[in-house]
Image (cartoon, coloured by chain):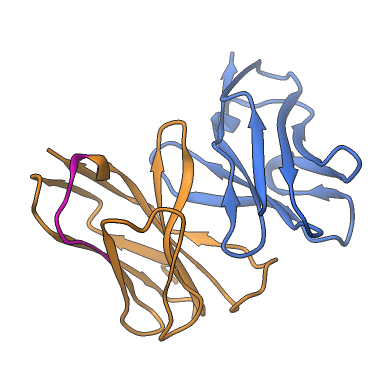
Amino acid sequence: NAGVTQTPKFQVLKTGQSMTLQCAQDMNHNSMYWYRQDPGMGLRLIYYSASEGTTDKGEVPNGYNVSRLNKREFSLRLESAAPSQTSVYFCASSERTGITTDTQYFGPGTRLTVL
Amino acid sequence: AQSVTQLGSHVSVSEGALVLLRCNYSSSVPPYLFWYVQYPNQGLQLLLKYTSAATLVKGINGFEAEFKKSETSFHLTKPSAHMSDAAEYFCAVSPTPLVFGKGTRLSVIA
């Protein structure tokens, strides 16, 4: 049981390049999330998927797109990377849709640098 | 809208001393509250959560937090700090998706 896995662990991009961050969970969870973490800013929600087949914007969605490929996988795409997107990206999942007391389980993160 | 404020971006304590990390929340509905910990170069993991069952919540590694509605607070405490407690701590409030505070970095001095 690996929990939440993320690939890659590290990535360096040039401005304007595109890439996809991958996330998968093996806990049969319904809901999945993408956050970015910046110094002094805490975690900010980019997008989330309450259940398979649905996605919604979070606090900071501009410049990103997501795909809930199936129940296990939730990817985050940067179409044209900008230096402001330099950050640590975390994927998380929780068991049930819309249950506010459910624990979120986090992946180890992807450190992205955009030059 | 819900929000949390963590007082102090950095707290430093001596080994064996009391740990107190402060969190105040704002919520228009009865909140559910969480504390997560992030060790260096790792993801976040749950320390404890308040779901209205009991106001004093015990978590892992000897941490506990008390929900005080009158003070809109959910402060995290541990009686005796250990070197291994050095990490960043995040308070968060429901509804799902969670809204996180900006974090408090705890340093433990030998």
Chain B, which colour?
blue
Q: Is residue B39 left or right of residue B79?
A: left
Q: Quadrant of the N terminus of chain A?
A: bottom left
Above/below status of B67 relative to A18 = above
- Quadrant in which the C terminus of chain A is drawn: top left
**Image quadrant assignment for residue B4:** top right
Q: Residue at x 65, y 33 (%)?
A: B6
Q: Position of residue B5 (x, y in %)?
A: 65, 36
**Residue at 42% across, 45% down:** B42
Residue displayed at 67% across by 59% down: B94
Q: Quadrant of residue B29?
A: bottom right
Viewer-closest of B64 and B103 = B103
Give the magenta part as a residue range.
Answer: A76-83
**Residue A77 counted in the magenta span:** yes
In the rendered structure, the colour chosen for chain A is orange
Q: Is residue A63 left or right of residue B15?
A: left
Q: Which residue is more in the foreground, A2 or B2?
A: B2
**Residue A56 counted in the magenta span:** no
Residue displayed at 10% across by 45% down: A15
Q: Which x, y percent locates residue A35?
A: 42, 54
Establish if B100 lies above or below B21: below
Image-based side of A45 in relation to B92, left or right: left
Quick one: A70 or A1, which is closer to the camera? A70
Percent from the top left, x then y, of residue A16?
Answer: 9, 51
Point out residue B54 in the picture as x, y percentages from the top left corner: 89, 56
Q: Picture quarter containing residue B23?
A: top right
